[in-house]
Image: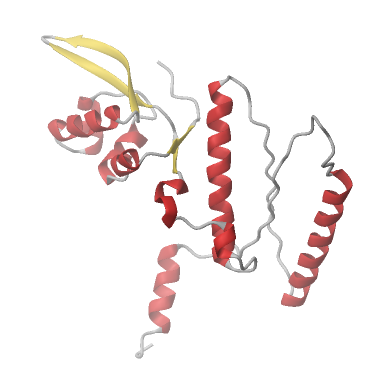
Amino acid sequence: MSALPCSLDVVRQPDRASALLHPLRQRILQALAEPGSASTLARHLDEPRQKINYHLRELEQHGFVELVDEKRKGNCLERILRATATTYLIDPDIMGTLGDTPEEARDRFSSAYLIATCAQIIRDVAEMRRRATGVGKPLPTLTLQTDVRFRSATDRNAFTEELAQAFTGLVAKYNDDTAPRGRLYRFALGAYPVMTKTPQEARAEQEQTHDPQA
């Protein structure tokens, strides 16, 4: 049996999301990147087999693991399972009307607007991916990513202005609202500071800053 190819499971149902968030189940899914049984998982994770079996049933019920083989061991039938995906993403739509949208965030220079835009991209691409997979077709997408170190805020602002002008110019050059067979694509540009510290380092620095004895 071979390892599961890289795949993404976009979780859209609240009950599936709830099932996925249990810490032990996440450890089980990580371990089941390679096929395994309740016995092997119990040894690997140092947990009781009965406990592992319970969580495996829950994961299987929600489609996170699948049966790949069965082996007879004495009077017992050992079930071999594996994870149905290697990466998981919870659809922002799961929040329903509580979820933010770019239209509601409004301020294009706020982090809330950027987060809302990214959430909308996740929703749209996840749904389009589901439809494309359903008909056996690839989904044409494009992602460009790079890091830029600016000498100053002035340089950053100048870069932003030039980028916006170039973006607007390309849109004006290639957009054709009259093309009867044309396909509409959505482009989004966003930027944010690169994290240079781990969450633990950031918390420690913040605590030290607020420590009156520091």
Q: Residue at the spot x=44%, y=68% of the render?
A: 201
Asked if residue 188 is positioned above or below residue 35 in the image, the reply reads: below
Task: Give the quadrant of the C terminus.
Answer: bottom left
User: Does residue 112 appear left or right of residue 150 in this picture?
Assistant: left
* Residue 73 in which image quadrant: top left
Asked if residue 64 is positioned above or below residue 14 in the image, the reply reads: above
On the question of residue 139 being in view, the answer is: yes
Task: Count numbered badges in the picture.
Answer: 0
User: Does residue 178 appear left or right of residue 214 in this picture?
Assistant: right
Horizontal and vertical percent for residue 162?
83, 64
Horizontal and vertical percent for residue 102?
58, 58
Asked if residue 72 is positioned above or below residue 181 in the image, the reply reads: above
On the question of residue 195 being in view, the answer is: no
Horizontal and vertical percent for residue 15?
30, 40
Q: Residue at the spot x=77%, y=76% of the render?
A: 154
* Residue 177 in which image quadrant: top right
Task: Give the quadrant of the N terminus.
Answer: top left
Q: Nearer the viewer, residue 60 or 98?
A: 98
